[in-house]
Amino acid sequence: MKTLEIPKDGLEGLKQNWRVDALSGFLVFLLALPLSLGIAKASEFPPAMGVLTAMIGGLIVSFFAGSRLTIKGPAAGLITICAGAVTEMSGGTQGWQLALGVIVIASLLQIVFGFLKFGALSDFFPHSAVHGMLAAIGLIIFSKQIHILLGIDPATLKGLEPIELFERIPDSILHEDFRVTFIGVVSLIIIFGLPLLKSKFLKGFPAPVFVLLITIPLAWIMDFKHTEPAFDMVQIGDFWSSVGFNANFSMIGTFVFWKYVIMFLFVNSLESLLTVKAIDGLDPWKRISNPNKDLVAVGIGNTVSGLLGGLPMISEVARSSANISFGGRTRWANFFHGFFLLIAMLLFIPVIEMIPNTALAALLIAVGYRLASPNEFFKTYKIGSEQLVIFITTILVTIATDLLIGVGAGVLMKFIFHIVNGAPLRSLFKARYERTENNGQYLVKVFDAAIFSNLIGYRKLFHSFEPGKKVQLNFSEARMVDHSFMEAFYHFQEEYQHNGGQVIATGFDNFRAFSNHPLAGRKYDPAKQTLIEIKLTPRQLALRKFSEEQGYTFYPQKIRSVLKYKDFPIEKGTHIRYEENLMEKYLDQGRITVSDITLTEGAGQAEHHTLITVVMVSELEQSIPDFALEPENLWSAFSELTSGKDIDFVHHPEFSKKYYLRSASEEATRAFFTESVITFLESHDKIHIECHRNKLLLYEKRDLLDTAEILHLEKFAEDFLNVSNQKVSSPLSL
């Protein structure tokens, strides 16, 4: 496909993209409604105030935001702070109103921080400590919501610490309400079972919507409204009369007030900034957001929300990722999501009050699981064992004390590791480097340490380079480079090379990496000569044998793929960061490369990875137009709206029914798909084929292939090219 045209912004963007943005906004609204209700209830706020927050985030903040694709709304990461603020400030309605006063003051400070361009300070906090904080929040959410799912009266849980809540789980199981628990368990089965289904249509639909479609009728059939306690159902009441000036500032002179101001300011700003950065990486048009402008916008939204009774909002990662998946293109998707929430609160409050709280508890348990899943521990360990220690330290201290102390403990542990591993004290907070420029090439020699605590200095360096040049960073004089720097350097490399420049890193020959992860931290250790032994997995051993038999050159290492898949349709709304197990050889038609790519969808705790075996054929003699061919399914009508017109062939109804074909060059694509090519594709199983920059990309399924399947795909690619070049009269029949 040709390089994507960047969608217009403002009113021009609305005219250009209102259909796709309205559709995406509607689908995100379906996801946001139950989550906003659940987050507000778990935060000790009136449930509808979560919806108010998301409405403000969509209808107001959209016009000020510094990011185009993020969705603003309440977040699970702030549940423990909101609930803690309400509880510590007398609880009930008064506690809620005093917490609103805290939110307003924190929001005003957030606006000031944005104007002072403090957004870069988010780089100071190491990823392992931040993820540890979020994992601790996930565990705390679970410790409370499991009791709600079992039908336990929330009033009996007030004032209990997370450890006490965990200790009470056996007792709650013994005293569970069977009917409430049944609906809660059904909700969990839907949430965790839906992604396991093979149906692309069902997997693409928001799980919370299915939860509501099943649990509302179940609660109605069981007559929950009349047979269960009031605390088992969502209660909205007279929503619009409760929206007004609700904030109370009478405790502004107390320690507890300012403790929560700092907590709100820290966690809210950090989560929001990290989401903006993560969503930029998924933006199909690679637009760069203004984090400081977005911080101001979120601060404005939080001020309005706090004054009127709502929760604090952030750029929320799960809903923002979903927005990209649903085809959202501009800030208007966020606006439409808020607009549909407004319509719901005007027309459908009686329906919303039919939602059982156990279903919302199930949704929050799923959110908590994503924040603290075993996969988070495993991902952290793969980067390095020292990262896991920081991660677990942050979790334990956070649960035992509070968020600020927990993150502080994680940061302190990170400093200890760096000092032990040779980071000089003089470079802990100062980036030390020497920069020279010669004939359009930048050479940077890095000294001492490049780590999280001096990363702001290196980011300023990265921003100082003119686009389109060659940048070389030499680390031979450094003693310590950590994961935070490697991650930042990778993103800089990707962005800079996307804009036509070149970035290379040298001087790591005498470094020892802490793991074989491409972005692992590393320290100077000339005795070890860097290398971690690569032990081949059973799959890699089989691929090596296959390569020897089929004449491939085999490279098992995991490498970063910055530009190789740039603008291929497979990467739209996703991110291909790594590929491994590369096998290369030359065919008559060109160079063929088989590899396992890691396709990353979503971001943050909503991030998930899919391993796919793909075949790329490059250095082709024939000229092929850019196109994307994929099997047609129930989502094709939706895809046609968001991704482009389906090119049908009147005289080949079987092919047109079997495949969804799109291209920006319809005439050239129709000329390429000759009678022979169409007949060939009709006679084979469904497959994905993409062409971009005269390179062909093929894959059978979104999964890994075994050696027999790889051989089959190689043969298919070879025959497809021969047929398209009129070299095969009778193609292989499967």
Image (spheres, rainbow, N blue to C red):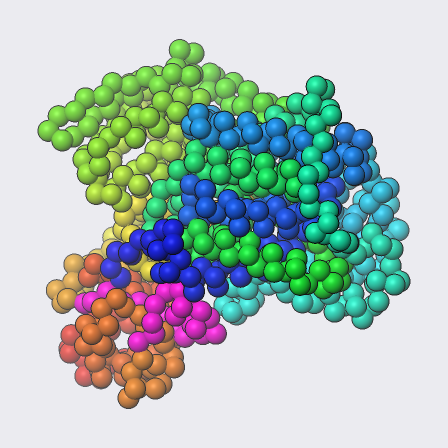
Q: Quadrant of residue 689?
A: bottom left
Assign the C terminus to one quadrant of the image: bottom left
Q: How many marks?
A: 0
Left or right, 565 with reference to 612: left
Q: Taking 310 as reference, is 393 above or below it?
A: above
Q: Please state which of residues 569 and 541 is positioned toward the viewer in this rendering.
A: 569
The residue furthest left is 439
Q: Residue at x 36, y 85 (%)?
A: 654
Residue 131 in view here: no
Q: Residue at x 28, y 72 (%)?
A: 716
Membership of 575 in magenta stretch: no
Q: Taking 76 as reference, is 338 above or below it?
A: below
Q: Percent x, y for residue 360?
A: 70, 54
Which residue range is magenta in the image? Answer: 624-647
Q: Residue at x 33, y 72 (%)?
A: 645
Q: Percent x, y for residue 218?
A: 76, 68
The residue furthest top is 426
Q: Percent x, y for residue 640?
A: 39, 70
Q: Taking 369 as reference, is 193 above or below it?
A: below
Assign the N terminus to one quadrant of the image: bottom left
Membership of 630 in magenta stretch: yes
Residue 333 in view here: yes
The residue furthest bottom is 651
Q: Please state which of residues 710 and 284 is positioned toward the viewer in this rendering.
A: 284
Q: Taking 531 as reference, is 234 above or below it?
A: below
Q: Percent x, y for residue 554?
A: 29, 51
Q: Quadrant of residue 347?
A: bottom right
